């Protein structure tokens, strides 16, 4: 039980730190603000969202995706779905995650972060409607190669070969918060 609490705590804290660092980097690097111009309310909003949703909620949700695919494989008698080591299982988990990103995660992000920044709910919903498609495509492009360990072994290892095994290179990764902030402009009202 103690290890489970530590794992959840680690996920919440690391997500919060990544949210804060990602937004500060976005404001300073992409938006070219001075340090004195960093929007602290936005940093707090992203830090809070990352801690609660990504660190907390996804800590539990992501554990259910492989279980759901395995159970679907059993019900349909499709061995490749129920066997976690197959590319079919990995692809099915990735599809569920893509569905989650489009239907739950992106709307939650725009509404929650917008509201935490002080944006009225109708404006936060308008921001979501305006940027949903570009955000969804951006997230899908950046996360598709990293959706599961099985896909990672079958796609990235052949591409990066010895560098991955030796630890001298890592596959490209991006923070969702940085992607969202660099592709959209949330209201400052």
Image: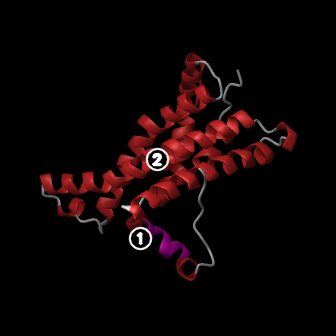
Q: Residue furthest front?
A: 2
Q: Can residue 34 be seen by looking at this rendering? A: no
Q: Main secondary structure of the magenta part?
A: helix
**Camera-side residue of 22 and 5:** 5
Classify mark 1: residues with Cα within 10 Å, few (<14), some (14-19) or many (20+).
Answer: few
The residue drawn where x is 17% and y is 59% is: 78
Which residue is labeled 2 in the image?
Answer: 56
Task: Tell me which residue sits at (41%, 35%) in the image.
Answer: 103
Rendered location of residue 162, percent (x, y): 55, 82
Residue depicted at 40% across the width and 60% down the height: 4
Q: CA distance from mark 2 to mark 1?
A: 29 Å
Left or right: residue 89 versus residue 158 is left
Magenta region includes residue 39: no
To which residue does mark 1 refer? 154
Left or right placement of residue 157 versus residue 177 in this view: left
Q: How many marks?
A: 2
């Amino acid at each position: 039980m103690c290890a489970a609490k530590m794992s959840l705590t680690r996920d919440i804290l690391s997500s919060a730190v990544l949210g804060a660092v990602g937004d500060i980097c976005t404001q300073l690097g992409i938006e070219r603000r001075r340090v004195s111009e960093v929007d602290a309310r936005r940093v707090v909003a992203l830090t809070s969202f990352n801690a609660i949703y990504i660190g907390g909620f996804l800590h539990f949700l992501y554990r259910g995706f492989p279980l759901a695919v395995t159970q679907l494989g059993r019900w349909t008698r499709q061995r490749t779905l129920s066997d976690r080591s197959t590319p079919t299982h990995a692809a099915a988990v990735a599809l569920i995650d893509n569905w989650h990103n489009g239907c739950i995660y992106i709307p939650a992000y725009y509404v929650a972060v917008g509201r935490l920044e002080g944006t009225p709910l109708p404006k936060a919903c308008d921001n979501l409607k305006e940027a949903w498609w570009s955000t969804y495509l951006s997230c899908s492009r950046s996360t598709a190669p990293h959706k599961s360990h099985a896909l990672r072994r079958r796609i990235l290892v052949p591409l990066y070969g010895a560098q991955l095994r030796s630890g001298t290179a890592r596959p490209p990764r991006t923070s969702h918060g940085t992607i969202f902030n660099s592709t959209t402009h949330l209201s400052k009202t």
